[in-house]
Amino acid sequence: MIERKEAAVAAKDSVACERPTRVRRVVLGLAVAAYMITYMDRVVMSAAVPSIQKEFGFSLITMGWIVSSFRWAYALFQIPGGWFGDLVGPRRALSAIVVWWSVFTSMTASAWSAASMATMRFLFGIGEAGAFPIATRSLSRWVLPAERGFVQGLTHAGSRLGAAFTPPLVVFILLRYGWRAPFFCFGILGLLWAATWYWYYRDSPEQHSSVNAAELAVIRNSLGAPASAKRSIPWKAILSSPQIWLICAMYFCYAYNIDFYLSWFPKYLNASRGISLEKMGLFASVPLIAGTLGDLFGGWISDVWLKHSGNVTRSRRVVAMAGFLLAAVCVWPAYKIPHPVTSVLFSGLVMFGLETTVGVSWALTMDIGGEFAGSVSSVMNTFGNLGGALASALAAYLVEFYGWYTPFLVIGILSGLGAILFLKIDAGRPIRGLAKS
């Protein structure tokens, strides 16, 4: 008996002296790369819009419906995507959907009409719908609670950084090889990522052969041991939570606003500001780079505040409200100022403010959703992307009938509403009936 205790103590001392491996950092890096690819594959369409219109003669409203077809699929398949990730595990689920959407990214180049292009983008949206919920689920057993805000900020910063690099890259490729070539290039990139993810990632640290005892101890000390058996997804508890609907309304406001910059900002620069196609890629990247900084700052400052105060609700709420209010204040100067460079810089401040809220919003789904963060985040992202789908189509009508100022006016109103909604969101109150992790 004494010998057994001595052996246990020796083993514990050995773990304490052992330096933890950094497998969770590699997992995070792969997740960031996935987020980058999702937005690269989306933004390639918005950067190619002027060239597509020129070849096919599509009107602005026709392009609006083509662009929004992705968003409608993306919104409608969020919950099935999150459910799929929780059901089969993020390793297999994320690999499968990245292969799916990469194929249809490339097939967009084969479109011959408005209907065929809309169909390709709809099928592409079905695949991408599960990306963020499954990626959130993939990190839930690897990321420590005190790092959630920063990690969600970092992953979303990766997506915006990918989006920021895409317009100039797409313009560079399409000016030399035509608008179809970028779709093929980005599709191949996604297939390479999917193969790497399936080879390296495991659904929990316990399953990964490269995780040593010290790193496993760090994770378990923060998250506890994994559940011994899979539980069915408690949809009733999730959907009956009043807090979920507040979060959904808030994210609707955010996603409507961000979609204008992702889907229509390059066209706005070209059509309203008179910026040439060659310069458009660079100008369109400025707000997205600012958004990348906002993602990093919002998640980081929220976690710093949480670490010092221990108040998860306040650390999430104040940061997000400040971001929404910054966007609301800066959006009108972004439209009204006549100088193109200054105007784009104000749009950068709008994006910085909006993106400050993102890491906080996705950390919320982990704070209140526990092991069902994938399903909880899929509900939030469903309603967010209904806002995005509405923006994709509605912006074209607003511009056609009332001019380019109307989308900016709507962004200001919804940013203010998002700040008000966050007053009622409590990150410290997990959904009743869900396991906390």
Image (cartoon, rainbow, N blue to C red):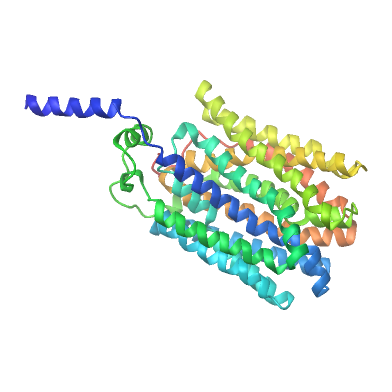
Check the image and report above or below for 119 versus 4: below
In which quarter of the view is residue 271 placed?
bottom right
Check the image and report above or below for 355 versus 162: above
Check the image and report above or below for 11 versus 255: above
Q: Is residue 197 something one can see in this rendering? A: yes
Q: Quadrant of the N terminus?
A: top left
Q: Is residue 431 something one can see in this rendering? A: no
State left or right for residue 46 relative to residue 310: right
Residue 304, percent across and down? 55, 26
State left or right for residue 286 relative to residue 196: right
Residue 2, percent across and down? 7, 24
Q: Residue at x 55, y 60 (%)?
A: 190
Residue 80, percent across and down? 50, 61
State left or right for residue 161 relative to residue 433: right
Q: Residue furthest bottom?
A: 112
Q: Residue furthest front?
A: 176
Q: Residue furthest right?
A: 338
Q: Nearer the viewer, residue 38 or 185?
A: 185
Q: Nearer the viewer, residue 38 or 332?
A: 38
In which quarter of the view is residue 277 placed?
bottom right
Q: Residue at x 76, y 58 (%)?
A: 171
In which quarter of the view is residue 113 placed?
bottom right
Residue 341, percent across and down? 86, 42
Q: Quadrant of the C terminus?
A: top left
Q: Residue at x 63, y 59 (%)?
A: 41
Check the image and report above or below for 77 versus 136: below
